[in-house]
Image: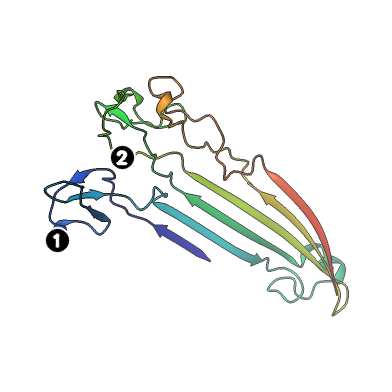
């Protein structure tokens, strides 16, 4: 089983235009300002969700032992060693979600050529917003995202047949099989603008369980 999702949103969040309704994208919202002479149309994003998501899952019975392609007629003792094995695997991956920026004065290109935990964008382009001034910067920028994430969980199972109605199943499960570490989104608070804390990741992604975790179980089926 495999699935892939692609999300495409208009990225001009927070901008105000006066185009006619017939020229606006579906995500536009028409607002009549109180006392204004003409309605304004504000463009907004539905969400800042990751643009790409992929899920792949599957189960495979190893083709050895009684009732399978190879060694089908092997002695029961050897079948207890080589037969009855199966594996299940689950992969999930996603691109980084679009970063939501606080109110700031933006001067220059906010993107960076080599985003990473020390700098996901060009923080030098952002200055603190003066008090009692109107926000003019967009909430997010096309192509500026936080860290992506992927994970593999795997299970190896062995079945021992005792009688036609009784069997024992051993399972070895590994979560975060590759023992990977994934960064969480950077500090995006307005108070951090102009400090070394702005634009940096300090914590692990909340989707990561931590270090590789293994679990063993035995089930008697009758």
Image location of residue 49, percent across then percent down = 42, 50
Q: Which of the two residues, 16 or 143, is positioned nearer the viewer here? A: 16
Relative to 3, is 39 on the left or the right? left
Q: How is the image coloured?
A: rainbow
Relative to 188, is 12 on the left or the right? left
Q: Which mark is residue 86?
A: none
- Location of residue 203 by image quarter: top right
Helix, strand or loop for disc 2: loop
Is 39 placed above or below 103 here?
Answer: below
- Which residue does the image show at 55% across and 54% down from the upper left? 91
Task: Count the numbered circles shown.
Answer: 2
- Which residue does the image show at 83% across and 60% down from the upper left? 218
Q: Residue furthest bottom?
A: 164
Is 4 placed above or below 125 here?
Answer: below
Q: Tell me the residue that label 2 is attached to.
A: 141
- Location of residue 53 by image quarter: bottom left
Q: Tell me the residue that label 1 is attached to.
A: 22
Q: Is the residue marked by circle 2 packed among few (<14), some (14-19), or many (20+) residues within 10 Å? A: some
Helix, strand or loop for disc 1: helix
Relative to 37, is 192 on the left or the right? right
Q: Which of the two residues, 202 or 15, is positioned nearer the viewer here? A: 15
Q: Which of the two residues, 157 or 40, is positioned nearer the viewer here? A: 40
Q: How far apart are marks 2 and 1 (CA)?
A: 25 Å
Image location of residue 156, percent across then percent down = 71, 58
């Amino acid at each position: 089983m495999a699935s892939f999702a692609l999300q495409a949103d208009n990225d001009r969040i927070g901008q105000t235009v006066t185009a006619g309704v017939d020229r606006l994208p579906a995500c536009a919202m028409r607002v009549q300002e109180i006392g204004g002479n003409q309605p304004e149309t504000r463009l907004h994003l539905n969400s800042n969700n990751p643009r790409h998501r992929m899920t792949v899952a599957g189960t495979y019975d190893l083709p050895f032992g009684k009732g399978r392609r190879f060694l089908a007629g092997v002695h029961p003792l050897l079948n207890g060693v080589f037969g009855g094995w199966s594996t299940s695997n689950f992969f999930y991956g996603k691109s980084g979600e679009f970063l939501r920026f606080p109110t700031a004065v933006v001067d220059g290109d906010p993107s960076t050529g080599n985003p990473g935990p020390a700098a996901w964008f060009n923080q030098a382009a952002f200055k603190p917003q003066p008090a009692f001034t109107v926000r003019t910067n967009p909430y997010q920028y096309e192509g500026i995202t936080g860290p992506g994430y992927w994970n593999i969980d795997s299970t190896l199972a062995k079945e021992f047949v005792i009688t036609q109605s009784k069997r024992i199943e051993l399972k070895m499960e590994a979560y975060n099989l590759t023992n990977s570490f994934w960064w969480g989104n950077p500090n995006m608070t307005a108070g951090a603008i102009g400090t070394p804390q702005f634009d940096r990741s300090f914590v692990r992604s909340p989707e990561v369980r931590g270090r590789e975790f293994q679990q063993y179980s035995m089930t008697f089926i009758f």
